[in-house]
Amino acid sequence: MPARLFHVLLILAALAALPAHALTVEVDAPEELKALLTQHLETARAARQGETLDEAELERLRSVSADTARELLATEGYFSPQIDSTLTRVGDDGVLRYAVTPGPRTHVRSVTIDFIGALAETDRSWLRTRAERSFTLEVGMPFRQADWNAAKVALLGPLLTIRYPAAQLAASEARIDPETQSADLSVRVDSGPAFFYGEPVISGSQRYPESIVRNLSPMKPGQPYRQQDLLDYQMALETSGYYAQATVRIETDPALAAAVPVIVEVRERPQKLFSVGVGVSTDTGARVQAAWEHRDVANRGLRLKLDGRLETDRQTGAVELAWPRNARGYENSLGAQIKHEDIEGQETRGNVLVAKRTRTRGQIETTLSLQYQTEEQTIGDVVSSNNQALTANYAWTQRTVGRAFYPRRGYVLTLQGGGASEALLSDTSFVRLYGRHTQYFRAGDNGRLILRGEWGSVLADTRDGIPTDFLFRAGGDNSVRGYAYQSLGRTLAGGVASVRHLATGSVEYNHFFEGNWGMAVFVDAGDAADTPAALSPVFGYGVGARYRSPVGPINLDLAYGEATGKFRLHFSLGVLF
């Protein structure tokens, strides 16, 4: 055996013969720093893992941990700490105590931000101002490494989402003055060139015409880049009915900035689909439904859909032929429906023919429709009538809540207007106006406040001859809880008839716990009547449970109707806008 190898083995044997000891580590430091040090010090980690350390290894970890403690404290803005450690023997084991005095904390004394690149050569001061306001580390704030890193990321945010997706940090420096415990921060941002859209580059389009993908795009070649455009485009593709999945992106290569290709990748849905479903709600009872859809009639992307739904209180059958969106952004459709419902003693049988033109631009959706409807209506032995109307209708909806199941900010606003004339296939001339607004507010870390208001009015000399779809009743899951579905209206001996005026409102607070569960408290109010003066709001008060299920939100509410003196259970699945 070589002499050098023999000596190494002797040293290792001697080290192995040294006694090994279990270790306990205690840290005496301010509370906001104690957890940080206890988690990351090497000696504390060894103690948590139950390691037994010989004297040499313990001293090595003790020295390394002191350096680690100084680095950790520096990230929190403490650059001149006092760190003392003492080792106390308790039998064969040891207790290592750290006494940490962090010293004065460093605060931000100045912040300097300058820009280079195309942004610096333009007069878009509003964008520079927005970027500077996004820098979250302000003068006078404690200097923390995590805050410093986050502030630099936030500074780039406005540029990356508007015009300058290749923006990056050219330089950054945090100059620390230990004597005055101050930090002078400087950041230089290279915006890179402004990006403008080029032509789309489409892949995955095989079953359906490629023109469908192109016409769904909200942007045109030559327009300046906005990240929101890509998100809107992707959402439009995924909600069009043709594509199961879509990805929209660009390459942030500065060489492509003048006309950057929009890369669109889609995964198509099958041409034909048959679906069935079951469900239940406290408004219309148990539900069974079936639908069949052909998404490429005549090889032109026309969608033919047949739909049937059987509910306890309502039955419907419908057929619709829809054209894909055209180059101007419009979607046209023709439809027919037969229906029967018996709700609160008002029984109606109706037939509907409708032609629609819909356009979605960003958060706003508009629909123009022409509808012809005939109806047979009975309410016990009191009312028996046949109604018909040819109506022109317009609807405008804005949604700012995104795609969240339980939105915590934003609103949904719907405005509708329409009417009919006796001179055109209608029994009565009337004008119908309707509006509904739901506003969501963040309330603390785990809560939200929901305010809802609804108003409707039919301007006509009489309600006679007006189909019930254009009149109003109140009550139910999404109206005034504590009262049966559509039970608030004109009370007759045989049931409750629809009327010409509606007003409802709601205030609700939700609190969400850990996991998928939440609770709600709410107050609803509203009424429906034949004249505005006759509106006499009734109140409903209640509590509820909220659950984030894989198929959508589930709401279960127990409400007390003040006017009836009774409790009522309300159940709904999904968010109705």
Image (cartoon, grey):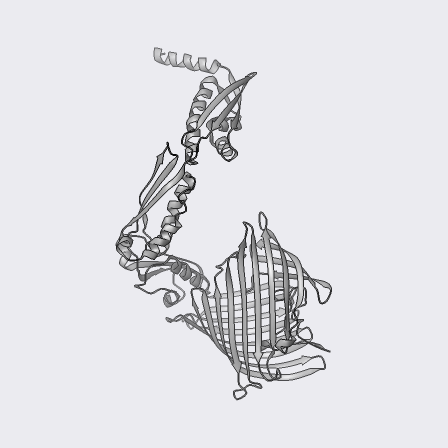
Q: Nearer the viewer, residue 474 or 285?
A: 474
Q: Where on the picture, by quarter, is residue 471?
A: bottom right
Tell me if residue 107 comes above or below residue 20 in the rendering. Answer: below
Tell me if residue 425 comes above or below residue 324 in the rendering. Answer: below
Q: Where on the picture, by quarter, is residue 567?
A: bottom right
Query: Residue lying furthest front in this view?
Result: 180
- Left or right of 212? Residue 431 is right
- Left or right of 195? Residue 296 is right
Query: Residue lying furthest top in this view?
Result: 3
Q: Position of residue 106 (x, y in %)?
A: 41, 36
Question: In the image, what residue occupies the spot 32% across and 53% down?
Answer: 252
Question: In the image, what residue occupies the spot 39% across and 51% down?
Answer: 133
From where the camera sits, is residue 498 visible?
A: no
Q: Position of residue 435 (x, y in %)?
A: 54, 71
Q: Nearer the viewer, residue 417 or 177?
A: 177
- Left or right of 514? Residue 497 is right
Q: Nearer the viewer, residue 328 or 478?
A: 478
Q: Nearer the viewer, residue 423 or 171?
A: 171
Question: In the image, what residue occupies the spot 42% across and 25% down?
Answer: 64
Q: Position of residue 24 (x, y in %)?
A: 54, 24
Tell me if residue 536 comes above or below residue 431 in the rendering. Answer: above
- Left or right of 494? Residue 36 is left
From where the camera sits, is residue 559 visible?
A: yes
Quarter containing the N terminus = top left
Counting labels gives 0
Tell me if residue 216 comes above or below residue 53 in the rendering. Answer: below
Q: Position of residue 146 (x, y in %)?
A: 42, 40
Quarter containing the C terminus = bottom right
